[in-house]
Image (tube, rainbow, N blue to C red):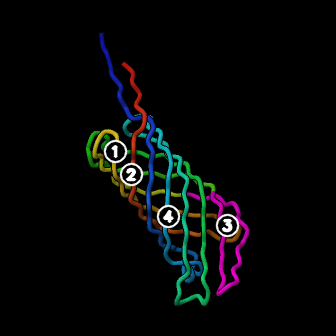
Amino acid sequence: MLVKAQFEQKLTFQGALGYIHALSPDYFVEVFEFGGSLDAGLQYNFNRSTSLVVLIKYATFVSNDETFFMDAYYNLIGISLCPKYKFIPHRRLNPYIYGGASLNYSSFSFGSGMQYYETPWEAQFGFNGGFGLDFRITDNFALFWQTGVNGVFYPDDMIFSRYSQLGINISMFKARAL
């Protein structure tokens, strides 16, 4: 008789803070070169190597003071669906790759002094992907660093950026099957 036990973390909370650097188009980079991001979501682990992550993200870019004569902001709220593959799931330090699609809502705001204008929030499709390192501290808690690219499609152009994030994974539920 063969008995197999399965005690895997099936559902994991993920949260991250990050840094964003705009890459293209040139007119966007001239005004909005750097920004920040905040992500939160859930990761469903199919097994120790393969996961599916659903993230809600917020990103913002602030205008460069030297190149723009008024304050300007680019804000993005999105939801991403990203498959993730871990290469060495039984090690404490585990490299992984991920990538997926996103639905985003974005808006520009700009102004000077007391007058500010904001464009209506509009929906766009996008993508993101990259690689990272997961450092498991305990069975239920891990830190991670990841970097990658993000693209947001507009009717006439695409905003393309690079990002790096630091975050945590907290496993909440385990599958218990014998």
Q: What label sits on residue 141 in the rendered view?
A: 1
Outermost residue toward the right in this view = 120
Label 3 vs label 2, nearer the camera: 2
The type of residue carrying mark 4 is: Ser
Q: Earlier in the sequence, mark 1 or mark 3?
A: 1
Give the residue displayed 39% in from the left and 24% down from the top.
176
Give the residue displayed 51% in from the left and 73% down from the top.
22
Q: Which residue is mark 2?
A: 168
Pick the front one: 80 or 61: 61
The type of residue carrying mark 2 is: Ile
Give the residue displayed 69% in from the left and 71% down from the top.
156
Q: CA distance from mark 1 to mark 3?
A: 38 Å
Secondary structure of the residue carrying numbered label 3:
loop
Q: Is residue 121 left or right of residue 177?
A: right
Q: Earlier in the sequence, mark 3 or mark 4?
A: 4
Q: Earlier in the sequence, mark 4 or mark 1?
A: 4
State the extent of the magenta-drawn residues as a range.
Answer: 104-127
Secondary structure of the residue carrying numbered label 1:
strand
Q: Is residue 25 above or below residue 102?
A: below
Mark 4, residues whose alpha carbon is within 10 Å: few (<14), some, or many (≥20)? many
Answer yes or no: do the residues labelled 1 and 2 have beta carbons within 8 Å? yes
Q: Which residue is mark 4?
A: 37
